[in-house]
Image: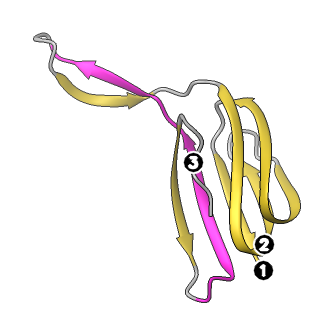
Amino acid sequence: FLRPPHGYQMKALQAKDKRTVLAYLRNWESQPFLDQEGNEQFALRNQSPIPVTLSFSMEKPYRLHLWDLDTGIEQDQGQIQRCELDLGVTSHDYLLALTR
């Protein structure tokens, strides 16, 4: 239904009746942490501003509620099915709630 934009990771959960979908989009760029020998020990999250466009392709229309988790702003995007939503250049994380 939605592929995460380049530079983002996504986790989604869908209700059994398929009437509700929750998706968490996280801005992610790996910043490796190296030891003294140059071996990667772990990676830190690095948020980088990038252009974000969400592309939806669903069989049935859903109502989209979008929360910007960095600002706390919630937006009702109305009914969507097959469309693109331009969020501009951002490093923010988002929660999407799709219901029908």
Residue 100 image label: 1
Mark 1 and mark 3: span between their CA atoms?
21 Å
Residue furthest to the bottom in view is: 17
Secondary element at tag 2: strand
Q: Give the residue drawn at x 69%, y 36%.
A: 52
Q: Which residues are magenta?
A: 17-35
Work out whether residue 68 or residue 79 is closer to the camera in this orientation and state it. Answer: 79
Left or right of 85 in this view: 90: left
Give the color scheme: rainbow, by chain, secondary structure or one colour: secondary structure
Mark 2 and mark 3: span between their CA atoms?
18 Å
Secondary element at tag 1: loop
63 in magenta: no
Which amino acid lies under the numbered mark 3 shown in the image of this protein?
Pro
Work out whether residue 81 or residue 48 is closer to the camera in this orientation and state it. Answer: 81
Q: Give the residue drawn at x 62%, y 83%.
A: 18
Residue 93 location in percent, x, y?
63, 42
Which amino acid lies under the numbered mark 2 shown in the image of this protein?
Tyr
Left or right of 24 in this view: 82: right
Quadrant of residue 14 within the rendered picture: bottom right
Secondary element at tag 3: loop
Residue indicated by mark 2: 62
Work out whether residue 5 or residue 41 is closer to the camera in this orientation and state it. Answer: 5
Mark 2 touches mark 1? (CB < 8 Å) = yes
